[in-house]
Amino acid sequence: MSPMHLYSLWYLSTYLCACEQVYHCMMDSSKFDSSSYFGRIHGILMYKDFVEFWDDVEAFEARPDDLVIATYPKSGTTWLSEIVDMIYKEGDVEKCKEDAIFNRVPYLECRKEDVMNGVKQLKQMASPRIMKTHLSADLLPGSFWEKNCKMIYLCRNAKDVVVSFYYFFLMVAGHPHPGSFQEFVEKFMDGEVPYGSWYKHAKSWWEKRKKPHVLFLFYEDMQEDIKREVIKLMQFLGRKPSEELVDKIVQHTSFHEMKNNPSTNYTMLPDEIMNQKISPFMRKGIVGDWKNHFTVALNEKFDTHYEQEMKGSTLKLQTEI
Ligand SMILES: *[C@@H]1O[C@H](CO)[C@@H](O)[C@H](O)[C@H]1NC(C)=O
């Protein structure tokens, strides 16, 4: 079976689990029990199957030429992955279109029994490998730090992240219903969503930013001046940013191109698994959509909490550009 089929199967089984849950909840009309979807790793909420096979992730053996793309979920991971793969493939669009992004850039900690297995996928992959992870710097397997692997962290402002995460809960099987937007924002503020507290996550990577093998990027900077950020990336990866190559990468990885590219828009997954009719995977790709979702009161509450969480940190994000 091709990895793409395996991936679909993984989603399908997750979906079936979700159906069972919906049925169960309808029967006893009780609240969703998030413990049937999520477990914990070092206290952090995580998809149950990832937790079950966490030992394999923790014991992962990095190679010195591995490149890690790290993000909190819904922060531009696919966008950055496609840019980096384009850099590695020296702008060869056809080569990039040969396989889905989740096979070119495997998802390290992703696991569903033996059907989907990021660790296994990576073990079988030829070097140099590019991989994605949503792990905080503290949870990233030690081997990556011991080998000084290059790592890129992409940070996006929390308000736009929570909006995107809400739609993700609605459209991807294997998530409980997020409730109202306000309810979901409160869960997010409490760190009671997969991968835990955004605040702790962003700060864990911010503390690593001065290491020469770590590059810390902002989603908002990429929206503001993508050319500048692509050049920054190429320099970090030791490539010569020729004008022609940079332009080609910028063009191929625009929101419009990626939304209409079957190898990046997740269109190969059936609706029952990722329902793009509820909300497309490539939804808006903008800065400031939070303004269309937050009420004035919720925004004030969020800001107050944000200041407490980020007190003393020099990490500053733009929420509009
Ligand atoms: C993904 O790309 C394909 C091919 O261009 C297109 O037909 C499809 O509508 C896109 N899917 C979404 C959800 O945008």
Image (cartoon, rainbow, N blue to C red):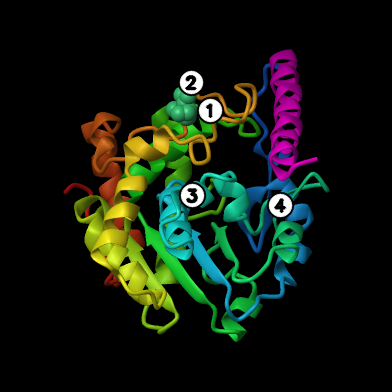
Highlighted magenta segment, given as a residue range: 1-28
Rendered residue at 51%/34% (across/down):
262
Q: Please identify, in this view, whether the residue under mark 2 or under mark 4 is nearer the observer.
A: 2
Q: 10 Å neighbourhood of mark 2: few (<14), some, or many (≥20)?
A: few
Residue at label 2? 278
Task: Identify the residue at the far right of this view.
Answer: 114
Please state which of residues 31 and 211 is positioned toward the viewer in this rendering. 211
Measured Cα–Cα span from mark 1 to mark 2? 6 Å
Rendered residue at 23%/49% (across/down):
319
Tag 4: residue type?
Answer: Phe
Check whether the beta carbons of the residues at disc 1 and disc 3 lie within 8 A of each other.
no
The numbered mark, 2 or 4, whose residue comes first in the sequence reads 4
Measured Cα–Cα span from mark 4 to mark 3? 15 Å
Q: 10 Å neighbourhood of mark 4: few (<14), some, or many (≥20)?
A: many
Measured Cα–Cα span from mark 2 to mark 3? 19 Å
Residue at label 4? 50
On the question of residue 200 being in view, the answer is no
The numbered mark, 4 or 3, whose residue comes first in the sequence reads 4
Residue at label 3? 73
Circle 4: element type: helix
Check whether the beta carbons of the residues at disc 1 and disc 2 lie within 8 A of each other.
yes
The numbered mark, 1 or 2, whose residue comes first in the sequence reads 1
Residue at label 1? 171
